[in-house]
Amino acid sequence: MTQRAAWWIAGRGWLRRRPRWQWGVLLALLVLAGLDHAFPPPVPGRDAPNALLIVARDGTPLRAFPDRDHVWRHPVALADVSPLYLEALERYEDRWFRWHPGVNPLALTRAAWQWLRHGRIVSGGSTLTMQVARIIEPTPRTLLGKGRQILRALQLELHYSKDEILALYVNYAPMGGVLEGVEAASRAYLGKPAKRLSHADAALLTVLPQMPSRLRPDRQPARARVARDKVVHRMAGVWPDSDIRDALQEPIIAQTARDPLLAPLLAERLRKDARGRQRIDTTIDAQTQQTVELLLTSRLAALPPRVSMAALVVDNATLEVRAYAGSADFGDTDRFAFVDMVRASRSPGSTLKPFLYGLALDEGLIHSESLLADVPQSFGGYQPGNFQQSFHGAVSVSEALSKSLNVPAVEVLDRLEPGRFVAALRRGGLKLDFPKGEAPNLSVILGGAGTTLEQLVGAYTAFAREGVSGKPRYRTDEPLVEQRMLSPGAAFIIRDVLESGGPVGRAVEQGPGIRRGIAWKTGTSFGFRDAWSIGVSDRYTVGVWIGRPDGTPNPGFFGANIAAPLLVDIFSAVDGQPATTRTPPPSVHQEKICWPLGTRFQPEEEALCHRQAIAWVLNDTAPPTFPDRLRSGEMRYAYEVDAVSGLRVTAACSTRPRRQVEAVHWPTALDPWLSSDLRAKAQPPAWDAGCQKQAEPDAGLSIVGLSSGEVIKRPRPDQAPVIRLELRGQRGQVYWLINGRLVAHRPATQPLIQTLTETGRVDITAMDEQGRYDRISVSVR
């Protein structure tokens, strides 16, 4: 016989010797186990409809979304409920809660005896577990309903711990109207979280579920007080006598229950990704959020119809969002209240310029005071203009960024290349949107793409985080997502320029540590459709957008006059920390540089340094000025002068001793904007008397054929006028420019014949190799 067969025979013998009652017990247990498996107790969140609560970082409700029965519920853990409430609840409702198996036979017997004696229900005899069973699965108030409630209570005790059952009661007990749970009632009636309940508050919310409608403190304060005092008296021996006396004297003062409504569009956004959760903890600071919303609301009266606003406040240290306002007023449908402009893709205007100059610094193309030309220029047919319709001539990178000049920015982007710029932004976390099939071009730096306020603010945090940008975080459990946008040195330099305009004399006087405030940049899209202002302090990065969500123009409203004041007000209200003193990173230091070459000042070449400036230099690199777009060759050139008189000569016209002088050209496009002293430094001396045939006529250059201010009319609407211009006072080569665009480079004796294809103002410039020029302005109609 095998061992397995022996075990089988022994087992049969043991089963035959068992008494019948044991078989009955075993069968009953199997039946109960089967019923428990077939009919599990309802679980809120699985079998019951869900409500969702969105809360701030301190637990303050931002917005509550009711369940399918329109019930408002604020989930809370037992650890976040006042111990006073838990003491009163167990003492008043079920003092044997921790000991019974879900049903208290003595309480049920007492309740049945009272019912038989008085003919009505005097006490229910329900334990807290039985009340939870009735809450999650309502039953009729009959003997059959009570029996079912008892079975469910036993089942709950089998599946859950005492604390889990108590947590179900704390979160689902009826509290009057559409409120359920102690947290919802505490915040709705008392304006405080359940963790801060007083003795009187705890007693009131303990008794409220017995008759939620009749004891509502906001409607029936007298009844509520009587019921509350009954609970307070019951706590004698548990609470100190002094606390009981104070609780009995405390009046019932309850506010009218209102739905919370802070950061409503963020709450709506998070609700769509709730995935069955009952509570979402956000990073929002309730006080900061309320302040920002009030600031937006206070400006509504000054805005035209259908204009909305959006604002975002991000903590630089953690990338957590402290305030989120997606629209100007959530209750104003005329202003597109439900359109979340934090997430809407819009033209960023000039807000990308800081990243352009920062990336150019990292590429070694510029330093903070590199020479740029703010003059009419054409870049492959693209002719940008400035917002103020004026030009400044020679400007530095710092001045171009501080004044948000367009032409210098396009010049730098042309050197960096639009595709590389857009790719670098994408690597840094800032993705730009382009129309389908469109490739990046020079217009991208002036708003020729789309992005969101959310992405812009996340990118701007790089200026406070040593060049590392990040994705704004809305939930406390959201991972930290960071990308390298700029080097620490480039981020420091650009932030300094945005805060103070660059180093120049002030930085030298104050030394390496410089006092800081807010670094900010504005932007306005084409047609005044979008007004932006983004600012960075040590603590926060704040972004503001103002415009019409439908994309229609809003004339006269631009970043500097409408968005920037709101940005400053937000910083003043939410950032009370004083500015700190920051020291440049090791890769950044100051150097004296020279214009027009753009390189470091060299004492032995002082004659070539027409203007000096103090610049921030990155990685010990002081790159030269960009090559001349109009004049080929090097900026440096040489000529000969008489060794005695210093007048200009050549070997062909003078046999006296000569010496060679090294000189430097300014960029050709800048010559008309140079001051008289700079032009004198740039031009060679007069010709010697014996070399007059080498010289140009004294009268200088003069354009003939048209005069400045003349109006040219088209012969027909579809026919462009043709002009013929000649030049007097020069025999050599000359450059002809129309609106800053080079159209011809030819001998001065050849006339310019040109078709004027565009209407409006036309600036025509003729310039020789020495920088002398003449210009006329005409109008084409």
Image (spheres, grey):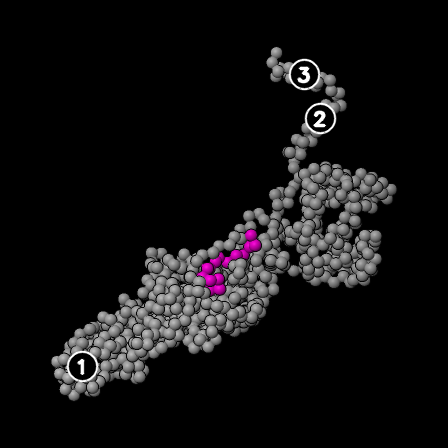
Q: Nearer the viewer, mark 2 or mark 1?
A: 1
Q: Which secondary structure, mark 2? A: helix
Q: Nearer the viewer, mark 1 or mark 3?
A: 1
User: Looking at the picture, how far across and down is residue 170, in whole percent?
Assistant: 70, 49
Q: Using residue 501 as the reference point, say whether residue 705 is left or right of it.
A: left
Hey, what amino acid is under mark 2? Leu
Q: Which secondary structure, mark 1? A: strand
Q: Quadrant of residue 428?
A: bottom left
| Residue 154 on the magenta segment | no
Instruction: Return the residue at label 1.
Output: 658
Question: Does residue 408 lie above or below 470 as drawn?
Answer: below
At label 3, counting other C-alpha atoms closer than 10 Å, the crowd grade (few under 14, some 14-19, many 20 or more) is few
Could you tell me how far apart the alpha carbons at marks 2 and 1 are, in whole angstroms?
A: 125 Å
Q: Nearer the viewer, mark 2 or mark 3?
A: 3
Instruction: Return the residue at label 3.
Output: 10
- Nearest the camera: 626 or 660? 660
* Residue at 50% over, 68% down: 582
Discs 2, 3 touching: Cβ within 8 Å: no
Q: Which secondary structure, mark 3? A: helix
| Magenta region | 462-477
Instruction: Return the residue at label 2.
Output: 26
User: Looking at the picture, how far across and down is residue 318, in whole percent?
Assistant: 53, 58
User: Looking at the picture, how far across and down is residue 756, in whole percent?
Assistant: 24, 74
* Residue at 61% over, 54% down: 53
| Residue 475 on the magenta segment | yes
- Nearest the camera: 181 or 486? 486
At label 1, counting other C-alpha atoms closer than 10 Å, the crowd grade (few under 14, some 14-19, many 20 or more) is some
Residue located farthest toward the right when viewing the structure as drawn:
117
Q: How would you classify the magenta stretch by its main secondary structure?
A: loop
